[in-house]
Amino acid sequence: MADINGIAKQFVDFYYTTFDSNRANLASLYREQSMLTWEGAPIQSATSINEKLTGLPFEKVQHKVETLDAQPSSPTIPSIMVSVTGLLLVDDSPNALQFSQTFHLIPDGSSYYVLNDIFRLNYGG
């Protein structure tokens, strides 16, 4: 299998740079069978996921990745599970939010698409 850690890092760098600069450009990473679970709410299809991401109620956002773990997810196809934790700076708030996000990447030609995407804010208790 290819260097999954390198692939995962390249994907995560692209995903969050794009999310932070122009969320609409993330649409190409999803397919009609893709599913996003956003804070417990399931959303299916590239169109619906793009509408959710572009409709989020903030102007500016910056992701700071703290951890990234990757594993192969199938013995027969070179798919990858990617788990990310980090900090989220929204608009001009000085208070960072902790988040976790998990991606299931499926090969598509020479790149990958997101089949599954699970996002959660992690609140301290």
Image: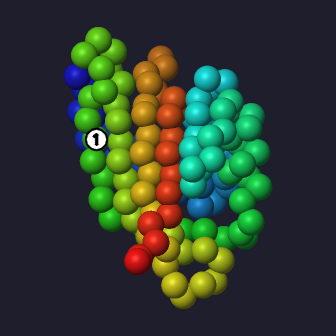
Which residue appears at 44% of the width and 40% of the height?
A: 103
Q: Secondary structure at mark 1?
A: strand
Note whether residue 65 is visible: no
Note whether residue 92 is visible: yes
Residue 47: percent from the left, percent from the top? Answer: 74, 34
Q: Residues within 10 Å of mark 1 (few under 14, many from 20)?
A: some
Residue 19: percent from the left, percent from the top? Answer: 59, 55
The image shows a total of numbered marks equal to 1
Q: Which residue type carries mark 1? A: Ala
Q: Which residue is mark 1?
A: 70
The reply, left or right, for residue 39 in relation to residue 106 is right
Q: Quadrant of residue 107?
A: top left
Which residue appears at 43% of the width and 31% of the height?
A: 105
Which residue appears at 60% of the width and 68% of the height?
A: 61
Which residue appears at 72% of the width and 70% of the height?
A: 59
Residue 25: percent from the left, percent from the top? Answer: 67, 45
The quarter of the rendered structure image containing the N terminus is top left
Residue 23: percent from the left, percent from the top? Answer: 67, 52
The reply, left or right, for residue 39 in relation to residue 69 is right
